[in-house]
Amino acid sequence: MNLKVLAGVLLVVGLVLGFAGGKVSTSGQLNELTGKVTSLSEQVKASEGLKNQLAENKAQLDKLNVNELYGLVKVDGKAKAYKIGDMNKMPPLIANDIVGNTPIIVSWCPLCDTLTAYDRRVDGKTLTFKAEEARKIPGTDIENLHFRDLETNSVWAQGPGIAVEGTKKGTELKSIAIQLFNKDRIDKMGVDVWKP
């Protein structure tokens, strides 16, 4: 065989092997890319489903009348419910109450839609609160319900539960967890409901 024919055959074999090798390599990359595209498509579908679910939940919450919801407080193994509508008055009503053996205050701020519960004991003394006017929380632009305790005459911001004026200024009330439920759920739990 002459060298030109041999070189031509080797060139053709090299091209065929190179093409086949490239095709195998490309095929592997193509499979990997296809897998990534499939995974991304599933993530997009999942995020669209989550987006739809969030929109549906928001629509349901928009239909709710906040005045019909109850805040449930559990302390010392006891529970009591507080209907937002009973506190959402003008002026706002504050629940100075006792759950278990713990004196608590429960309040609703109509300006910022916050329901809070705090332990009313400060320095070993049980405080009694009454609603004050709404005002900005010092150092912020947030309008919030404030209340005054009758024992020290200090003024407290409802949201953070901190005294902003008076002898107790800077003192923070101990926060108590509060959960929201509808009337059916409260009835099924059979808990007492605070009455103003």
Image: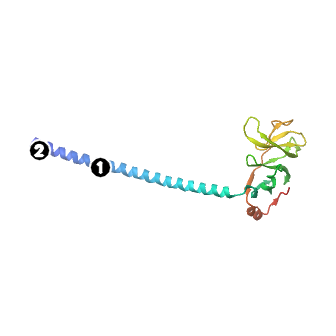
Circle 1 or circle 2, nearest the eye:
1
| Residue type for callout 2 | Val
Along the viewing direction, whichever of 20 and 94 lies nearer the viewer: 94
Q: Residue at x 90, y 42 (%)?
A: 151
Q: Which residue is mark 2?
A: 5
Residue at the limit of the structure toward the right, as seen here: 151
Q: Residue at x 46, y 53 (%)?
A: 41
| Residue type for callout 1 | Lys
Residue 78 visible to an observer of this rendering: no
Rendering quarter of residue 168: top right
On-image quarter of the N terminus: top left
Q: Position of residue 38 (x, y in %)?
A: 44, 54
Residue 16 visible to an observer of this rendering: yes
Q: Position of residue 175 (x, y in %)?
A: 77, 46
Where 98 falls versus 155 (above or below)? Answer: below
Q: Residue at x 40, y 52 (%)?
A: 34
Crowding at dot 1, Cα within 10 Å, few <14 / some 14-19 / many 20+, comes out as few
Q: Position of residue 194 (x, y in %)?
A: 83, 57
Along the viewing direction, whichever of 117 and 59 lies nearer the viewer: 59
Q: Is residue 24 left or right of 63 when viewed as pictured?
A: left
Q: Is residue 38 left or right of 11 when viewed as pictured?
A: right
Q: Residue at x 72, y 38 (%)?
A: 141
Q: Position of residue 130 (x, y in %)?
A: 86, 46
Q: Earlier in the sequence, mark 1 or mark 2?
A: 2
Along the viewing direction, whichever of 170 and 85 lies nearer the viewer: 85
Count of picture labels: 2
Separation (CA) of disc 1 from disc 2: 27 Å
Rendering quarter of residue 80: bottom right
Q: Which residue is mark 1?
A: 23
Q: Is residue 38 left or right of 75 when viewed as pictured?
A: left
Crowding at dot 2, Cα within 10 Å, few <14 / some 14-19 / many 20+, comes out as few
